[in-house]
Image: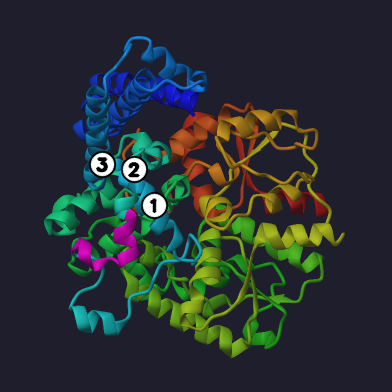
Amino acid sequence: FDLLGLLLVFGLTWAIVRRFKVRHELKDKNPVTTETKDFIALIILLGLSLTGYLVEAARIANNPQEWDWCSPVGYSFSRLLPGLPDGAYIGIWWFHFGWVFAFFALLPQMRLRHIVTATLSSAGSPERPMGELVPVSMEQVESTGMIGAANATDFTRWHLLSLDACMECGRCTEVCPAYNVGKSLNPKKIVADMKRAHDTGAEVAATLTDEALWACTTCHACVEACPVLIRHTDFIVDARRHLVAEGRFAGSGAVMLRQVGSTQNAWGAAASSREDWMKGLDVPLARDKGQFDVLFWVGCAGATDPGAIKTTKAVAKLLAKAGVDFACLGQEEACTGDPPRRVGDEFTFQAMAESNVAMFRKYGVQRVVTACPHCLNTLKNEYHQFGGSLEVYHHTQFLAKLVDEGQLKPAELDPGSTVYHDPCYLARVNGESDAPRRLVGESTSLNTDGPALFHALTREHDQNKVLAEPVQFANKTLCCGAGGGRMWMEEEPGHRPSERRVQQLLETGATQVAVSCPFCRIMLDAGLKQADETIRLIDLAELLQDANS
């Protein structure tokens, strides 16, 4: 322990020097700077350590024992205090006690309080999935007179406790795709501002800018990176709910909300157009079959966007080839409500959810396959809030199962020729990174706990690797920028997360980019056309269809 204390002294000294240097170099340039109270905390700990050695040296000098050599640091200091009288030893002891008292007295005001609050916050962390948002009931609205969080006190006790648990380490900000392309969103600052609003009684809107709140893609990178389990997305969406209810949401995002309300399609397409992609294909419809084993949920993008329609057709053909008893809702399908809920329009989402759940009951739907990770998350993790308990699969999961059973052949690719982009709502939010890779013959189970770069480097030596991997992959993937309703909001050139992701994908040297999300496909398509038009963009389902045609 004597030697470990010496390491603590060196560590604290290094931390003080480093923080002073970082504060000097990055002041006004980076939010991860050091405040005065950080230095006070480090100085108090350093004082505790040094005075602790001083007490030990005084004891040895005042009352030497034959085993004093077991404390080499204290013993060495004692040589400087020969024949120390009792009064001096007692005075030194009380001096050290003063530092101990100061430490415990100031602990609630220092970041070190997170040692206690983080333990309590982690113990009370909700069991719900990462991608599930808590619904707002009409009873809550009637009792509070508002929707969402106008004040910090409107959050749950656990959320407020998690604010105290924040160490302000900045890991959330370091991984934020919006912050890293120059947007005003700073997850660490969001938490700090929320805490300040709670401490001062100020309204949330007075401490957070609308621009920062709407920049969030709800990719949950900040949530996954947080060592004390803070759910930044909950804070942001609840604040958005209040802004939407107050009419403070305009622009192309607001147009999307009106389109969902009028056409039940986020792209504003008429319900009759949901069956246009089926022309020339023998796709079974639920209203004709009545009973079926699997519902193929197409989604708004899958029935509207030209690129996503290619994926939709490929999945339908593969299901038919494998002999799966499936059907589509066609004109009876409506938006899951994911885009409205993420931008803060909770009750439009609830209207969509209740309508779709009624449709599921009409046809006795139990199993659902969808090519959209956002639809997957909503159907799987949130529809149970409205009585829709479903067994939901992403199309890569269901197709991988068919490949494992021998009903379909895996796609054959030249090693390193194709790079796969993991969608946030599949890989990180719903923890699925293996199934997409099994479609191309990879069997290695991914475990990316730790720095993404380390795992990308180690996979260079993986003999089963078919796909080239970008620096950030699997649950450490980098967001394309489409989530959280950002798909329908304007993006300034140079501030688009998709551009940064495209750069990472191209750095692998692959000539083909594979995706498994219609949102990602739309965002990356624009970025690839600007960067290199020769790169092919294709869904994994299309690759699998080529291998089974």
**Residue annotated with mark 2:** 167
**Residue annotated with mark 1:** 118
Residue 61 position, x and y percent, is: 36, 18
Which is more foreground, mark 2 or mark 3? 3
Looking at the rendered structure, the kind of residue marked 1 is Ala
Q: Residue at image x 31%, y 18%?
A: 17
In the rendering, which numbered label is found on residue 110? Answer: 3
Q: Residue at image x 39%, y 77%?
A: 350
1 part of magenta stretch: no
Q: Residue at image x 55%, y 35%?
A: 451
SS at circle 1: helix
- Where is the C terminus found, in terms of image quarters? bottom right
Is 363 left or right of 443, judged from the image as shown? left
Q: Residue at image x 54%, y 29%?
A: 532
Which one is in front, 71 or 334? Answer: 71
Q: CA distance from mark 1 to mark 2?
A: 9 Å
Residue 240 position, x and y percent, is: 27, 61
What is the magenta segment's predominant secondary structure? helix
Residue 384 position, x and y percent, is: 51, 78
> Which of the marked residues, 1 or 3, is nearer the chain's N terminus?
3
The boundaries of the magenta stretch are 151-162
Question: How many numbered marks appear?
Answer: 3
Is 291 left or right of 375, judged from the image as shown? right
Residue 402 position, x and y percent, is: 79, 62
> Which of the marked residues, 2 or 3, is nearer the chain's N terminus?
3
SS at circle 2: loop
